[in-house]
Image: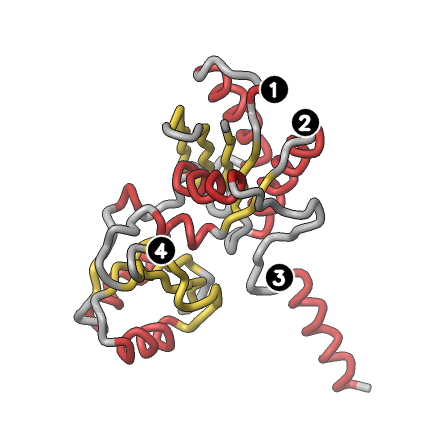
Amino acid sequence: MIVLSVDSSSRVATIALLNDDNLLGEYILNDKREHSVILMPMIQNLLKDCNLTVDDIDGYVVSKGPGSFTGLRIGMATIKGMSLGSNKPYVSISSLEALAYSISPFNGIICPVMDALRENVYTALFKNENNKFEKILDYTPLDLDDLLDILKEKDEEVMFTGDGLTKHKDYIKENFPKAHFAPTHLSIVHASALGELGLNLLKDGIFDDPNSAPIYLKKPQAERELERRMKMDECKS
């Protein structure tokens, strides 16, 4: 089975092609260029470099977030379109789970953190329990101090990963002695990790409904601003 996986949940655009036994190829571009401009050319070039065509793909994997609202919509729309156009299944995987999976051999709690502005992060907790990679705290936006309080209660070694470290690593070091940090190259989402997780689901016959939506965790800014204005109008009336 050959799968194409795509993540565009952050400023990083990453795509990969995998089969049952191998990573066939992967592109990672950590740049400010718009995903809407670069994503399809990246897919076309990777297929060409791997001597494959769209007809060779048996299934698709895409990040469902959390992350950039625009980036998630672009990735999801791209994969949904390719899936529907080829009548091949797709499955969506959280970007947080893909981050954690890249360092899953760690013997302790794995804590991916993605920047959610101010002092907040998108996060979840994962751990290898009896040789099984499991989620032990569901996807959630948290104040960083609240997250550290939760981890202190668990009293275990913790490996942090994700783009939230760019902003919060020093603070975590100062306030959580049991912190470890993933190397830089593993602190971004890899489409290969996303694809491996999705490949296992697709092989088991698990795939998404065409109407599935991304995990935003927070409402879009425009929607929050509208709600704020409506509340102000209510107070004035």
CA separation, marks 3 and 2? 34 Å
Q: On residue 55, which mark appears? A: 1
Residue of label 2 = 86
Task: Give the amino acid type for the residue marked by disc 2 in the picture.
Answer: Ser
Q: What residue do we see at 55% from left, 50% from top? A: 64
Dot 3 or dot 4: first in sequence order is 4
Q: What residue do we see at 47% from left, 21% from top? A: 46
CA separation, marks 1 and 3? 39 Å
In the rendered image, residue 29, in percent from the top left (x then y), is placed at: 41, 33
Q: On residue 77, which mark appears? A: none
Q: How is the protein colored in the picture?
A: secondary structure
Task: Give the amino acid type for the residue marked by disc 3 in the picture.
Answer: Gln
Task: Give the amino acid type for the residue marked by disc 1 in the picture.
Answer: Asp
Name the image quarter holding residue 34: top right
In the rendered image, residue 5, in percent from the top left (x then y), is placed at: 50, 35
Dot 4 or dot 2: first in sequence order is 2
Dot 1 or dot 2: first in sequence order is 1
**Residue toward you, 221 or 175:** 175
**Residue toward you, 106 or 30:** 106
In the rendered image, residue 32, in percent from the top left (x then y), is placed at: 46, 39
**Residue toward you, 109 or 117:** 109
Q: Determine contact: label 1, label 2, CB under 8 Å.
A: yes
Which element is circle 1 on? helix
**Residue toward you, 115 or 135:** 135
Badge count: 4
> Which quadrant, please, contains the C terminus?
bottom right
CA separation, marks 1 and 2? 8 Å
Q: Is residue 174 above or below residue 37?
A: below
CA separation, marks 3 and 4? 34 Å
Residue of label 4 = 133
